Image (cartoon, rainbow, N blue to C red):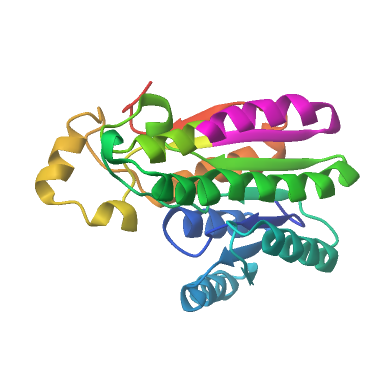
Amino acid sequence: MFRLDGKIALVTGGSRGIGRACSEALAEQGATVLVNYVKGEAAARECAEAITQKGGKAEIAAFDVARTEETEQAMEALIKKHGRLDILVANAGIAIDGLFLRLTDEPMNKLFDVNVRGALTCARVAARSMLRAKAGRIIFLSSVVGEMGNAGQTGYAMTKAALLGAAKSIARELATRNITANAIAPGFIDTDMTSGMTPANKELMLKVVPMNRTGHPSEIGAACVYLASDEAAYVTGQVLRVNGGMYV
C-alpha cells in the first residue's frame, strides 16, 4: 500500500524539517523527489544524497517560490526534463511573529509572497502538467494556527488559513480530472522553527496538546505519503490535522 513507484514529486523547501521528512518519505515509497531550496544548497544536496544512499531517487532544484517568473521557468524545465509532475508538496514557508497592532505591510507582504503566492504559483504550474496527464496530487502544508489562530501570529495564521481555502477551491475545480488538492495542518512539531523556544514556553505549549508531546517531522511525512498515494484517490478538499489533539 501507498507505493509511489514511477511518480515524480516536487517538494518546495524540501531540504529541512518537515520538507525533508516529506522528501524522504516520498522517496522511500518509490517516488523520484525533486528537492527544492533557495539558499541552502548544502542542506539540499545532503538530503538528496541521503535519499540516494538508501536506494531512492532524488535531485535538487534551486528556485525561490516568492519569485513568480523564476518559479514558473524552473518548474517548466523540471517538467520538461522528467516528462511530467505527479505530486506537488507546497511546503516552503516562513514565519514572522509579532503582535497584530504592530503588524506592518513589509512583514505581511513577505509572508504572503512566500506562504500564499509562492504556493499558488507552484500549484498552478503543476496543475497544467497534471491536467495533461489527467491525474495528480497537490498538497499544501498549512498549520494548526491557520484554523485555531494564535496570539502574536496573526500574519502567519492568515497565510496558513488562506491555503485551506485554496485547497478546497482547487479541489472543486480539478476533481473531474482525477487531480486532488488537500492540506496538511501540522501542530507543535519538533523542527528548527520550534527549537528556539525556551523550555518554559515549550512546557506551556505542551499543556494544550492532549498527547503531551511534540510531533516528529516523519509523522507529517507519513501524512504526505498517504495523500500522494492511489489509496487517497477519493480524498480531496480536506485538511489532514496532525497535531496530537491540539485542535480537533
Query: In this rendering, would 239 be left or right of 56?
Result: left
Look at the image and tell me whether residue 29 can be seen: yes
> Residue 119: x and y, percent?
60, 47
> Residue 83: x and y, percent?
86, 61
> Residue 241: x and y, percent?
45, 31
The residue lying furthest to the top in this view is 248
Is 133 a magenta residue? Answer: no
Is 166 a magenta residue? Answer: yes
The foreground one among 41 and 3 is: 41
> Where the C terminus falls, by quadrant?
top left
Note whether 58 is above or below 151 in the view shown.
below
The foreground one among 4 and 11 is: 11
In magenta, the rendered stretch is 162-183
The foreground one among 108 and 7 is: 108
Identify the residue shown where x is 25% and y is 27%.
210
Note whether 247 is above or below 222 in the view shown.
above
Look at the image and tell me whether residue 91 can be seen: no
Q: Magenta stretch mostly in which secondary structure?
A: helix
Identify the residue shown where x is 48% and y is 56%.
21
Quadrant of the image occupied by residue 163: top right
> Where the N terminus falls, by quadrant?
top right
Identify the residue shown where x is 36% and y is 43%.
104
Note whether 52 is above or below 110 in the view shown.
below
Note whether 108 is above or below 206 in the view shown.
below
- Label tally: 0
